[in-house]
Image (cartoon, rainbow, N blue to C red):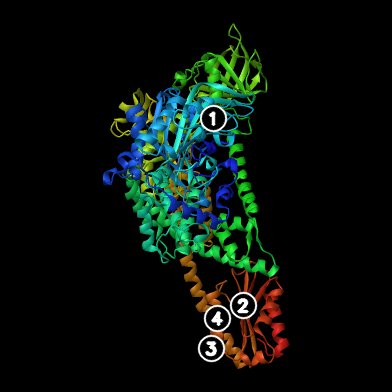
Amino acid sequence: MRFVGFEVIMAAAHLGWFVSRASRGSSFATRSAFVGSSAARNMQLTNNKRARMSFTNLSAASSESGDDVWTTAKVRSTFVDFFADKYDHTRQPSSACAPLNDPTLLFTNAGMNQFKPIFLGQTDPSSPLAQLKKAANSQKCIRAGGKHNDLEDVGRDTYHHTFFEMLGSWSFGDYFKKEAIDYAWELLTEVYGLDPDRLYATYFKGDENVDEDIEARDMWLKYLPAERVIGCDAKDNFWEMGDTGPCGPCSEIHFDRIGNRDAAALVNADDPEVIEIWNIVFIQYNRDEKGLQSLPQKHIDTGMGLERLSSILQDKTSNYDIDVFQPLFEKIAEHSQVGSYSGLVLDDDVTLKDTAYRAIADHARTLSFAIADGAVPNNEGRGYVLRRVLRRATRYGQQILKAPPGFFQTLIPVVVETFGDAFPELVKNQDTIMEIVKEEEEAFSSMLERGIKFFNELESDLKEKGEKKVGGDKAFFLYDTLGFPIDLTELMAEEAGLVLDVDGFSEEMEAQKQRSRDARNAAKSGNAPKLELIAEQTAWLADNGVLATDDSFKYGLDAEVPATVKALFGPDGFLTGGAKAESGDFVGIVLDKSSYYAEAGGQEADVGKISCLSDDGEIVGSFSVTDVQAYGGFILHKGAVEEGSVEVGAPVKCQVNYERRRLVAPNHSMTHVLNAALRKVLGDGVEQRGSLCNDVKLRFDFSHKKALSAKQLRATEELCQQSIADKEEVTSEVMPLQDAQAIDGVQCVFGEVYPDPVRVVKVGSDTSIEFCGGTHVANTNEAEAFVIVEETAVAKGIRRISAVTKEVAANAIAEGSKFDAIVAEAEQLSADTPDLDKKAGGLRKELDQGFFSAVLKSELRARIEAIQKKAIEAKKAALASRVDRCLNDVKAQLAIALAENKQAIVLNVDIGADSKASQKVMNAAKKVAPGIAFMGLSKEEQGSGGKLVAFSVVPDALVEEGFKADEWVRTTLEACGGRGGGNSGSAQGQAKECDDIDAIMSVAKEFAKTKVGAAVL
């Protein structure tokens, strides 16, 4: 079957046994073949257990000696040792399960992901990958998010995982089908000791496009009888990387857990007792728009799930029954209030207790490995998936197992203890994993409560309307806004007798993803045609005698390098037969040599133009270079023909925009200095997590758990500025990778693959030394100035610093100095300066918008806050004095009213708009003249025409006669567009504007007269 997108490679190539194939629909739906009714499947599982026969030929593994037990660790090491020691395969380390340097993948979901450049023909000739012929390893994999997402199924059965290990072996143009099949048979039957009578092999039976794989079939017939060598269609036995690219037939090895029977009909029938354990992919074709062509080099790519194989060798029916899960289950049981794990599935697991155990144990592994490899939970991409995984585990624990909040973080040390020997990165990063999980777990506890409340309200609303469907938009709101797991929403819907609109939710989710994809693609490409060289194109270049581009000129300056056009590549492929790229055409040009820097290592590509020359050297055309990328040693200059035309074989002249390069280079060099400065200020725990260098700024992402203090930020900035002042020399040297790695203090990017030999860039005698292929200044003083303009969080545990150099930095310094002077001037103003607090507030807004040092901003922000505090305290003191004077005036006026037997009084009081002060005035009125109705009116600022407040108290006796305080305030304020509230005895209100307070006082008095006659003062 043809799959779409690179992320699907594992579905057919490696994990047919492990997950339901994409081609068979969703993983939940495809289990129906063997689930049927869950009761029937449970009965089948029980009967199979009873019928199971113990292994009789497990070689030394059948010994009762503890050393001979097939632990998961032993299964792993045996696989790699077999290929490395006996058949000379390279022991290839597992790549990170969170591929930070490959944006096309959320997670490493197959063993072959790290070899993607080899299969695509994009390997840099100097990369260690280019030298690989044979390799073997156990790859850390995560299947959560993206096209192949097992997250929703984990816990429900005994074989789905989000984290797993993939045992893999590869041949890159070395051996092919015969050896791959021979090695597999030898390892399974002679080393692991599996019973040959329980093994079945499949092969591709052919279709209208590809012939039957007779070669693989006949090789299997050397080991197996014909009835156990089974031909299958492309859905099961033809692997493709995507719509185009490398592909080929594959051969699966299946194992019958029961034995002593003919299980051929159960192969690829989703029977839990006849399972695929190993897939061998024969990559021998390339597919393009015209169909299939044979590859010049044929590859082998195999994958076998470690957990599945271990379950067979340990004679367990469930992956979750193998040794590595038992310590996790024991720890979970310590927190569970509903009992320990008993292994029930589907309808038998009525309380979902065992489902929760499996999900929590799996998710603890996933979070531990992903965070150890540098990924962190957040709201984007793989980070959001990890947050989803953690919240799913938290919900299972707290709601199903009744575990206390915080239980999940206690599982991390168990994972580290179990897997730390094989994967030391877990041990190294245990504290970081614990801290991140703790924060995430605590944050979700409150969100869980909010989500349940929202759903309960939704349930009531639906039932009142007589409806039963929980809309996809509501489910998506729970998921996206409240972080509520979709499976919990679905479960609660079922419990409430409702159904979830899964399709509607999926549409909402896909719409959001599509919006993100569209935005990213538009921003990245500027809507230009996508031009990329993959295996088909690089093979075409090689077949047509085009050599890798000589880009050694890229480190020079002000050189117009002459070159020859070796190939033209457009949206429809290579231009051949003398075809030309005409004015307006967007194409990619491959040259024999180039002075352009192709995007790499965080540095943006050079731009400029390529002048087309006549035979006598005259310029006859122009090509605008807007992007430059490297594919397998070939440099593709992308852009548009502006004048004339371009053809293969034509002489050209590379004209890089060196003025822009001179702005990029200092930013790149100072990124190295910044990296070193951060390590000096924060410690050696700082690791680079990404960077961007262009002609405008430099951006540096690094691991650190919290925001830098103002002191740390200033120290970092000053170290960088000192490097410029010290005029440190920047040098580079190319050396063997092994020698470079031995250099004391050398820095490299986590997860990056470096060429061999590698270029080492050194700043000063000991300031910085890093692997780097970018362009740099010769001396740090060329950067002229350095300013950190922002320090912020990218994700949990990842910080980002943005900085500028040269003229941009100088301008930032100048702007900062001006603003410093303005703040200093404001600091000299007396505290009682009118509107000083408002002036300080305005400075704060200007500060936030200003482009200058983040260090200075932090300091100025504190100074401005001090000005505001000083002004506010002065205002409070002045107001207190005004209130005291006002109270005396009110008491005097009330005394007059009492003397004249008045029943109501309206006063203009000078207390601003202070609610506490108005309460004091009302209390004084009630105390001095408890029988008089009182109203006070006060302007926020006398004579300003602005805000007016009104407040009143009316004694009970007058209330009984119909004189109500709330009516009094409302009537009064309606005259100036205000409103009020309260009760019959006490009320208050306000109007936004009032130009004539005397007129409003008249309205208040007229209302009082209608209630008490002329007895109003």
Tag 1 or tag 4, which sits nearer the N-term? Answer: 1
Residue tagged by mark 3?
927
In this view, the mark in front (2 or 4): 2
Residue 773 appears anywhere in the view: no
The amino acid on which the numbered mark 1 sits, given as a three-letter code, is Pro
Q: How many marks?
A: 4
Quadrant of residue 166 within the rendered picture: top left
In this view, the mark in front (4 or 1): 1
Q: Crowding at label 2, few (<14), some or many (≥20) Cα neighbours within 10 Å?
A: many
Residue tagged by mark 2?
988
* Circle number at residue 921: 4
Tag 4 or tag 3, which sits nearer the N-term? Answer: 4
Tag 4 or tag 2, which sits nearer the N-term? Answer: 4
Tag 2 or tag 1, which sits nearer the N-term? Answer: 1
What is the x, y in percent for residue 435? Answer: 38, 54
The amino acid on which the numbered mark 2 sits, given as a three-letter code, is Gln
Tag 3 or tag 2, which sits nearer the N-term? Answer: 3
Gap in Å between the C-alphas at discs 2 and 3?
18 Å
Q: Are marks 3 and 1 in contact (CB under 8 Å)?
A: no
Residue 496 appears anywhere in the view: yes
In this view, the mark in front (3 or 1): 1
- Position of 460 compared to 635: left or right? right
805 and 838: which is toward the camera: 805
Q: Secondary structure at mark 3?
A: helix
The amino acid on which the numbered mark 3 sits, given as a three-letter code, is Lys
- Position of 524 compared to 1015: left or right? left
Q: Crowding at label 1, few (<14), some or many (≥20) Cα neighbours within 10 Å?
A: many
